Amino acid sequence: MALQTRQRRPYISDSPESSSPISSSSSTSYSKNEKPKKVDDKNKEGFSWFLPLFALGMLRYMSATSNIIHDCDEVFNYWEPLHYLLYNSGFQTWEYSSQFALRSYLYILFHELVARPASWFFSDEKVMVFYAVRLFLGLISAITEAVLVVALSRKYGKRLASYALAMLCLTSGCFFASTSLLPSSFSMYAVSLSSGLFLLDKPATAASVAATGVILGWPFSILAVLPVTCYCLKRRFRRVFVSAAATSVVVFALSVYTDYIYYQKWTSSVLNLLVYNVVGGGESHLYGTEGPLYYLRNGFNNFNFCFVLALLFLGILPITRKKYTPDLLIVVSPMYIWLAFMSLQPHKEERFLYPVYPLVCVAAAAVIESFPDLFRDKYAPNEKSLTVMIAKILRPLVLGLILCASHSRTFSLINGYSAPLEIYKHFEHHEDAGTGSVVCVGSEWHRFPSSFFVPDYVGEVRWIDDGFRGLLPLPFNATLGGTAAAPPYFNNKNKASDKQYLRDLEACTFLIELQLQRPYAPRGSDLSTWEVVAALPYLDRELSPALYRSFFIPNLWQQKNVFGLYKLLKRIPK
């Protein structure tokens, strides 16, 4: 007779990997291996990719087609070398002299991937190539920021992600920086993408993107990606280190090889730039200095109250640390590091702040989303009170105020300062001037929108002396070696060259001039020599009140501001 043995009914806690019917279907309890599945399902909640891609894509398209050029450095250090590679003509700055080699041609080649096919397709319309590159920049911006928004929605919910999305779309800073051909904008794309990948728990890819942004974009942006990269290393050191190191070696090697091809010598523009600005090899203060509050003023102009709220992010952490630490704090922290570092530098420019622009929106969105948390009773967090209800109502009101002020700022800049871009488009209507025409530009050299706006019948663009004593760009010289040239008239001390100005003003066929209400007569006022063929209004910054020139206020914007005329003049034949 067989001995009957009674088996104990297994408990789920005793057999966490049990596949018995009791543990899989009959019991309402869950096992340890089922718990991560529940968390994973929750993390998958959030925005689909369509909404952020569509919203950001539409706004970046608007930026690409309407954005002005905010900095002459964008034109002369990036658009002009790109134009030279495409059409064998364009202006060269001293940074592109092989003697100094501070700028990377790898960054230019990255955009030539789009510009070259566009130049074949739009063979007679160089302006279309300009806008094709801008649309490419807008597409990159939309994709990288969409990754950040989707990551925020999955990690912190749709409300915070919605606020961030709205501000990424409409704040003036992001609107303008997104389609600027600048390494600082490229670094901004890298910061957005690496931050999003970090929140999506893809540390190796996040670190690789960060490395690409530093080497291919702007070396100084290493400060903007350092917190995310370090935390990725802390999480999965070996995998992250191998990925980031391999990416860095490949991109750096490509950069050095590209520099060799164009500068015709072994050099590294990345290292040259670091030496010039950090080790003491250069004097960037020669190009202007600003006070320590420059970026605070600039941040408010481009983000208004969004910037103020972003700075308050650290202030709300004692209340919201359970929600936002450590991940969101790590993502937002570069904003503070970058602001502090850049504010200590004597030479300041608006574009230097671009890499952390998306983080300003993320930090402000977190603060707005946390308004009710600031008034909840920590001992009864679910209790509904009047102050909590008011705080909830304030969220859309504050967001609406930010977006309205941002639109006002964007509208003011586009309508007040777009004349330089638009006036050069009028050249296409004056081909009767003949091949070899000379366009002369005086004090408006720094608003030259690039050779993409100069038609083929124009032989050259020349600067005329209006009192500027710094070093101006000069045309690439094929005789001296083109991109490999080290022209003797270039220097790194910002000293004017005797070759930069056209002395014979009789050679000018066209004249570009800004006429303002000043006590001196402009060159174009001699109506016996010049005829005005196009004139557009241009906001006079010095005579217009700061409030009304910075933000568009209906009716008052036109009434309170003072406008000059941006003119294209043509020489009258004798």
Image (cartoon, helix red, strand yellow):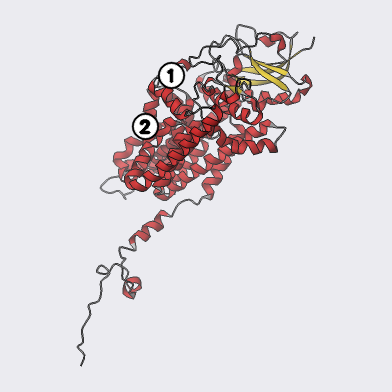
Query: What residue is pinned by disc 1?
Result: 282
Rendered-image quadrant of the C terminus: top right
Q: Residues within 10 Å of mark 1 (few under 14, many from 20)?
A: some
Q: Secondary structure at mark 2?
A: helix
The residue under the point 33% across, 61% down is 35
Residue 357 visible in the shown view: no
Task: Tell me: residue 448, above or below residue 201.
Answer: above
Read off the residue under disc 2.
336
Q: Position of residue 431 (x, y in %)?
A: 77, 23
Q: Earlier in the sequence, mark 2 or mark 1?
A: 1
Q: Is residue 437 visible?
A: yes
Of marks 2 and 1, the one in the foreground: 1
Residue that protrudes farthest toward the front in the picture: 265
Indicate the amino acid at tag 2.
Tyr
Question: Picture coordinates of residue 420 (x, y %)?
Answer: 63, 23
Q: Position of residue 444 (x, y in %)?
A: 60, 17
State how many labels appear. Answer: 2
Quick one: SS at disc 1?
loop
Say which quarter of the image contains residue 314. top left
User: Up-down: is 234 above or below 1?
Assistant: above
